[in-house]
Amino acid sequence: MKSKYYLLFTAWLLLSGCSSKSNFYQLHTAQINSANKTTNLKRTVIGVAEVDIPEYLDKPEVVTRLSQGRMQVNETERWAGAFDKNIQSVMTENLSGLLPKYSFMSYPWDEPVKEKYRIYLSIVHFDGDTTTGMVRLEGRWTLVNMNDNSVVTGQNIQYHEYVATHKSVATIDEMVAMQSQMLNKLSRLIAGKVLRYL
């Protein structure tokens, strides 16, 4: 009897091991050619605040959309780190490449530095539909003067893009690539506003 339970337990472990293999994804920065992406604290410092994401996205699994009101949490498709931190780091690096005259830093930081401005990003939707290939980014960004907490500029964002795929359904790889392109698009929009208002 003991050997029977042992065999069953061993089989369960083997099956668990096979099903526990996961793929890990990470949003990536744009290929922006800049002579200097390093942080120079003598330049005007602009902080990039921690990104506010909705509860349904605040998890290690990649969440995709099956219909307007139905979501799927992909147990074996996971983010390589916190999703909100990944968005923040990508935005910081993108902006650093686009506007080398400023120093962009992800808040909070260890250095005893006070930023003059801070960029806030609040996301309402940032997911993709694997059946239609549509990826959407919706929310709002704001640029704040930290000296008097006044809003310099900001706007609502609503990006809807379709993944170019030859398959019947879009893959997670394709959707993550599109999400990265959307962050690049948003970074360029914010960079243009920073140049205009500062």
Image (cartoon, rainbow, N blue to C red):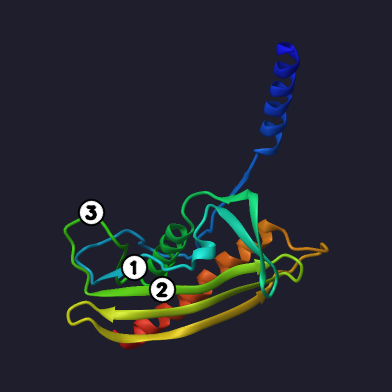
Which of the two residues, 41 or 162, is positioned nearer the viewer here?
162
- Report which residue position mark 1 lands on: 49
Which of the two residues, 178 or 66, is positioned nearer the viewer here?
66
- Report which residue position mark 2 lands on: 121
**Residues at circles 1 and 2 in contact by the CB criterion of under 8 Å:** yes
Upstream in sequence: badge 1 or badge 3: 1
Q: Position of residue 78 (x, y in %)?
A: 58, 50
Horizontal placement of 19 versus 197: left or right? right
| Cα distance between the residues tagged 1 and 2 | 7 Å
- Report which residue position mark 3 lands on: 110
**Residues at circles 1 and 3 in contact by the CB criterion of under 8 Å:** no
Q: Residues within 10 Å of mark 1 (few under 14, many from 20)?
A: some
Q: Residues within 10 Å of mark 3 (few under 14, many from 20)?
A: few
Residue at the image position 76 percent from the left and 16 percent from the top: 4
Q: Quadrant of residue 175?
A: bottom right
Horizontal placement of 62 versus 110: left or right? right
Residue at the image position 67 percent from the left and 27 percent from the top: 13
Is residue 88 among the parts visible in the rendering? yes
Which of the two residues, 179 or 193, is positioned nearer the viewer here?
179
Tag 2's secondary structure? strand
What amino acid is labelled 3 in the image?
Asp
What amino acid is labelled 1 in the image?
Ala
Q: Quadrant of residue 62?
A: bottom right
Tag 3's secondary structure? loop
Tag 1's secondary structure? loop
Q: Position of residue 20 (x, y in %)?
A: 65, 38
Upstream in sequence: badge 1 or badge 2: 1
User: Looking at the picture, does residue 33 appear above or below residue 139?
Assistant: above
Q: Residues within 10 Å of mark 2 (few under 14, many from 20)?
A: many
Q: Position of residue 129 (x, y in %)?
A: 69, 68
Q: Quadrant of the C terminus?
A: bottom left
